[in-house]
Image (cartoon, rainbow, N blue to C red):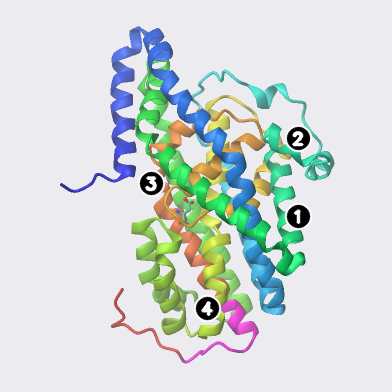
Amino acid sequence: MKKVQLSTKILIGLVAGILAGILLQGSPDIANHWIKPFGTLFLNLIKMIIVPLVLASLVVGTCGLGDVRKLGRIGGKTLAYYLLTTAFAVILGLILANMFSVGAGFTIPAETKAAEAKEIPKVVDTLLNIIPTNPIKALADGNMLQIIAFALILGGGIVVLGEKGKPLYDFFDSLTEATYKITGGIMNFAPYAVFALIVPVVAANGPKVLLPLLSVIIIVYLGCFLHAVLVYSGTLAVFAKFSPIKFFKGIFPAQAIAFTTCSSSAALPVNMQCTEKNLGVPKSICSFVLPLGATVNMDGTALYQGVCALFIANVFGIDLTISQQFTIVLTATLASIGTAGVPGAGLIMLTMVLQSVGLPLEGLALVAGIDRILDMARTTINITGDSACAIIIAASENELDRNCEIKHGYSV
Ligand code: ASP
């Protein structure tokens, strides 16, 4: 028998949960006391793994970037492009979500209105607070921005240590693998958790609570489209004098793989082929820029996180201040370095973005059911950004083969 994919199971969990929620509308107590705890168990498991996962994967990611330094000029340009475009993607996501008030018009009362209870921090304080005076406390408190800062600094230290830093690197590398495995295990519960989390929401508020989800899908797809048109076409035309039409034609096979597999890593081999054979970037640049991008550059994921954070805030009736939105830009940009290029990784990292501004993690249940649909768009954008960067780097190094023709017979 064919194995049912996890994403299909999650969707089934969502639909079943909605139906059960409708049936239990008259008796929300059953939903709250008997069903919701299973969802809470799942959220606790996610909360348990997120701190070690972020710390370990970011330390390892930063060590990877350490090699970039050795590559000097190309490394610097690549990193600058990756980070700037990712930050732009989150900002674009937030602008669109604010403009269209994603999820507004329907409010679920939040149990933990942590974001409201907090005093509004100033931007300067947010920036100063990024450096933890006590990293152990940051880890214990689950202060995401501080954990990210500590991980980047620790990773930098390991790189500078060179050979001596190897055991520490191996430790974090192995911890990363272990936390990925555990996350994979936890995700197997996701279909049941989505069921358990959505039942009480629908039982208490009625099925109309789901309508706003459609707006999330539309805004994420619109954002991804705009990002491709504005940022990739724009930077290709300005910095590489490269035709965006040729670019999108040449990259299409890789996009198709990314769209269907929802994995940047799975699309990497085809992306390398397309970028080299169709678009004329030399192998030496492809083999450095693209694998790095598949691990650290996730514009689509960052955009999606911006939209979802605002959606969850709106649905739970929490106003996000400008400084909180700034924190989202920072966390989502940095989170993309630690996000694995596999299906659903962005959803896990969304926990961290939500936590950084005190938004209720229950909101995850709402977006988890449609995550696959969003993953298709964001992964496509993730890999498109890597290829655009490779072309710009090749052009800036005068190594772009401008006569390279798209091989129409090229098959995936
Ligand atoms: N699936 C995405 C990727 O592989 C990561 C994510 O879940 O956002 O690029």
Mark 2 or mark 4, earlier in chain: 2
Residue 153's disc is: 1
Q: Amino acid at mark 1?
A: Ile
What residue is shown with label 2?
Answer: 137
Residue 101, image x, y percentages: 55, 36
Magenta stretch in the rendered image: 391-403
Q: Amino acid at mark 3?
A: Arg
Q: Amino acid at mark 4?
A: Cys
Q: Are marks 3 and 4 in contact (CB under 8 Å)?
A: no
Q: Residues within 10 Å of mark 1 (few under 14, many from 20)?
A: some
Question: In the image, which is nearer the foreground, mark 3 or mark 4?
Answer: 4
What residue is shown with label 4?
Answer: 286
Question: Residue at horizontal 57%, vertical 37%?
Answer: 310
Q: Are marks 1 and 4 in contact (CB under 8 Å)?
A: no
**Vertical arrangement, residue 117 with respect to residue 166, above or below:** above
Mark 4: C-beta under 8 Å from nearest atom of ligand 1: no
Residue 138, image x, y percentages: 73, 37
Question: Residue at horizontal 39%, vertical 75%?
Answer: 249
What residue is shown with label 3?
Answer: 372
SS for dot 3 = helix
